[in-house]
Amino acid sequence: MKDLITVIAKALVDHPDEVRVTTKEDERNVTYEISVHPEDIGKVIGKQGRIAKALRTVVTSAAVKEPKRVSVEILS
C-alpha cells in the first residue's frame, strides 16, 4: 500500500525525490502520512481537495481486504 501511495504522489509533484510516505499503525487503524516539497503541497491536494479525495478513495478501495481502517494524511 505504501508503494502505491508513493508512486501516485511522485507522479503528481515537481520534486519526486522529496516525496516521503510514513506509516503509523495501531490496533484498528493504519495511517499513511505523505510529506512533499513545500511547493508541491497544492499539487497533491488539488483544487478544492479533489486530488487528495481521489487519492484517499484509491487507497481505501485498495485496502478493502485489510482488517484495519486505512487513512491518508497530507503533511505540510
Image: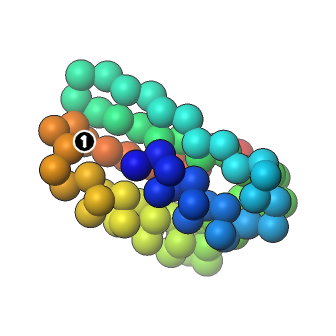
Query: Which residue is pictured at 66% across the width and 70% down the height?
Result: 12
Query: Which residue is pictured at 26% across the width and 63% down the height?
Result: 61
Query: Which residue is pictured at 16% across the width and 38% down the height?
Result: 67
Question: Toward which corner of the image does residue 44 lie, by quadrant?
Answer: bottom right
> Mark 1, residues whose alpha carbon is within 10 Å: few (<14), some, or many (≥20)?
some
Residue pushed farthest top? 27
Residue 31 appearing in the image: yes
Q: Mark 1 points at which residue?
A: 69
Query: Which residue is pictured at 66% across the width and 62% down the height?
Result: 10
Up the image or down, 29 lies above or below 66; here it is: above
Residue 29 image point, x, y percent: 29, 33
Q: In which quarter of the image is the C terminus?
A: top right
Up the image or down, 69 lies above or below 28; here it is: below
Residue type for callout 1: Arg
Q: Which of 3 and 46 is in front in this view?
A: 3
Residue 27 image point, x, y percent: 24, 22
Secondary structure beneath dot 1 equals: strand
* Left or right placement of residue 30 versus residue 45 in this view: left
Question: Toward which corner of the image does residue 58 lie, by quadrant?
Answer: bottom left
* Left or right placement of residue 38 versus residue 31 in this view: right
